[in-house]
Image (cartoon, rainbow, N blue to C red):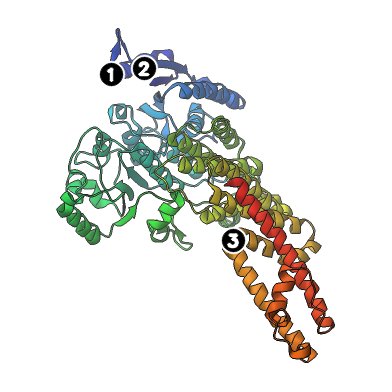
Amino acid sequence: MIFVSIAEDKSEFAALKYGVDFRAADQSKVGNKPANLQHKELLIPPEIAEKPKELPAAFADIAAEFSRWLKEDEVTVLVSRVRPMDLNPLLKKNRESLLAMLILAFPEARWFFGTILGYDEPNADTEALDGFRVRHGLFNLFQPQQTPFFDGAGLRDWVRRRAKEDSETKKDAGYLPRREQLAIAMDEETYYAHLYAYTAYRFGFRSLAISARTAADAVLGPNASPVWRAPYVSLEDLYLNFPDGGGGLSDLGDRRKEFPALGKIQHRILMTSNHGTAGNLAKNARNRKYIAENGIRLLHKPHAGMLVVWEASGLGRRLRWGEGKVRRGVGEGYVWPPDWREIERIERKEKQDGDENKSGGHSSPGILLLIARCLIDRAKSMLPEGPSSVEEAVRGAVLVGDALELLGGKTPTAAAEALSLRHQFELYAEYGFIGVEKYIPLDARFQEIERDAKSIALWFGKQSERTALNIQINTVNQLVRILRAHNQFDEEQVCTNRARHLHNSLYMHRQPWRYVFLPLLRYSEFLFKSFSRFALAIFLWIGGLSGLFAWALHAYGGAPGKTQNIDALPFGNAIGTFFGTAPVTSYGHWAIALSVFAIVAGLAHLGIFISYLYTLVSRR
């Protein structure tokens, strides 16, 4: 572990060093030194506020050091003093702005603060300051560690809140989504815990990935830390067996006694792999009764990806908040993509009320773009060799997901890159974990990509529709590459079909006259989707051609010589012309014209069928 002490003056380092030494007292030692522990000191003097133009350069220098440290080990940051109400990256008037930038840019780091300033200011919000002290004070250094990836303690949400509520910056940051509610993911397998925690995070919750009994006690136990309020959502393994002890947790009644805070959770979702044995019949019966009485949703492992888990849990339907416009399926405070019409309505009303503060215009604030660029570049550094684990893939998804939210789509190129990377890392997380099903539906992911691409493309004006298609094509093509690398043939075919649909849409959009080909292009997409659809189309073609040949025969006055050969019957004519090249010439010009049409259609379908077979054979 690497401890980083941040102070305004060198004299403050001594107190922080004492905290590091006290924290390291229980660690194993190599010689006379704690094992796997480093201590860095970073001096950020208050004079930095006097040169706001140098703030980006200072951030870049410190960010380079943080990036290097995080590649080596976990990083815990101790700050000597802080003014929480100024933790706003857009203010650029004091060192707190730089700290806020670092907090947003490095979600993996743990942050703890010493002296809390601001109580003596006029109209000080002492309740908010007390809450900040409880959740982020230096004494929390000695609490059981929780992963900071998913902002369980709410520090990143605090920074966003300050930017959204400050009178000087609220118009620039009004689009930032917040995560006001807490979710927990509890599983002794860390991969499952991280995947569930990230699932809750991407749908608007601060979340905790709990894989140890000490961490669970700190959040849910009888003596739970005041840092954690009662979670709103929980995703729990039914058969919990933490490595650091704690029996009886697979009995839900006993679990409730061990963790009283579970009784306050509004939505509990249990996950199970159904490995209960005959010796546990009584306990299984008690669990079934407990689940039925408490309205708990039960899901079975393995799961078909994070989007399916969220939908199967019912949270996509049951979660709702907001007055007027109701938000569904996400945590309170989380609005994504930004509702630009609502934001513009509020701005117009404020101007009418005499508030002439200027908004940030049509681009993301430069500071937020700088932070987002740092997040994106750090995530991209993982891609050449691919994430080494599920946790690494989830980390990358958090980095680019936060970048996308900070940009809000107002810097479209960077936002489109973040969108593509987010879905790439999510696929890496899902397909890199054997606990996820082999086949994962992609329709919901395509819908998300389309929604976010359209939101980003709004800033291109008249070119928005074409830009949205280009963003979707780029993202889907990257997903095809990942699916191919993981030998996910069926999903690769689905992605390829989606890319074909988008390419065809873009082809027509470039020249309006090309829309005359719309029926043919959409029909070819239908045929390529699956063999069953192709077979259905052939069946319908034969039936339709048989009807047309029957009409031509009837118009001609019946078949010559009243032959009974099947070749001369309408059905035989349809088969012969669609699968062959010999036209029907025995009853009139209509039959000849119909034969030519059937032969051309048959050859076209043959070409599509050969292409489809080639794709199957070459990939399987």
Residue 275 visible, this orientation: yes
- How many marks overall? 3
Mark earlier in primary sequence (2, 3):
2
CB under 8 Å between callouts 2 and 1?
A: yes
Viewer-nearest residue: 370 or 357: 370
- Labelled pair 2, 3 in contact (Cβ < 8 Å): no
Spatial CA span between label 3 and label 1: 61 Å
Q: Amino acid at mark 1?
A: Gln
12 lies above or below 88 = above
Q: Is residue 125 visible?
A: no
Taking the image as shown, residue 235 lies to the left or right of residue 342, namely: left
Q: Name the residue rendered at 56%, 33% in the picture.
A: 383
Q: Nearer the viewer, mark 3 or mark 1?
A: 3
Kindly identify the amino acid type of the residue bearing the numbered disc 2: Leu
**Marks 2 and 3, Cα distance to the nearest angstrom?**
59 Å
| Relative horizontal placement of residue 592, taking residue 153 as reference (left or right) | right
Position of residue 156 measured from the top left corner of the image (x, y, whole percent) = 44, 38
Residue 98 x %, y % = 51, 28
Relative to 141, residue 586 above or below: below
Q: Amino acid at mark 3?
A: Phe
Q: Which residue is mark 2?
A: 37
Q: Residues within 10 Å of mark 1 (few under 14, many from 20)?
A: few
Residue at 51 percent across and 55 percent down: it is: 444
Q: Please give the residue where the numbered disc 3 appears in the rendered image.
A: 531
Provide the secondary structure element on which disc 2 rests.
loop
Q: Secondary structure at mark 1?
A: loop
